[in-house]
Image (cartoon, rainbow, N blue to C red):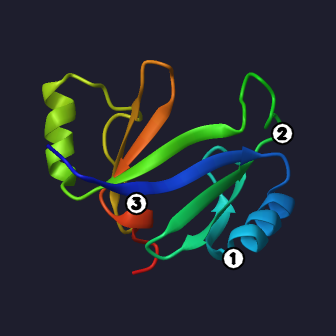
Amino acid sequence: MFDIRGIDHLNLNVKNLELSKDFYKKLFDLDEKESGTSSLGNKYSIIGKKDGFYLCLYESLGAGEVASGFFNHFGVNVLNYDGIIEKLDHEAIPYEYGGHVEYPGSRSVYVVDPNGIEIEISEKFGGNLDN
């Protein structure tokens, strides 16, 4: 069994990164933690609060259209990451992206539910951005 500590972050496709970032920063009093260009060439920004709430905003020209929608995936943080990997293997639940994704301060694994919703399961809250 594994314990989910909470929702780790929301990853949203947005039409205008700067406008969206300003809106969420004001609305939730969030700080910018990281920004850049993704491996797919989209501009992105991660905003949030330590040990609280993170939004990952990715600029996408098709954001809001039925085909892509605003919702990209949701992330959960677990206390025993290795235990969830064992469970995924035992249940034969396939990983996306070929397995673990190694970030600078954390590991994640991505799975897709039966509805096609992607879920990121992470080892450290917020990808360990604040450490």
**Secondary structure under badge 1?**
loop
Spatial distance from mark 2 to mark 3, Cα to Cα?
26 Å
Q: Which residue is mark 1?
A: 29
State the image coordinates of residue 85 (x, y, percent, origin top left).
20, 41
Q: Which numbered dot is residue 61?
A: 2
Query: Which residue lies under the disc numbered 3?
Result: 103
The spot of residue 57 in percent (x, y) is 68, 55
| Residue at the outermost top position | 114
Which residue corresponds to the image point at 45% horizontal and 79% vertical from the top-left? 130
Label 2 vs label 1: CA separation? 26 Å
Secondary structure, mark 3, is loop
User: How many C-alpha atoms fall within 10 Å of the one at disc 1: few (<14), some, or many (≥20)?
Assistant: few
The residue shown at (45%, 65%) is 126
Residue 40: quadrant of the picture: top right
> Of label 2 and label 3, which has the lower sequence position?
2
Picture coordinates of residue 30 (x, y %)?
65, 74
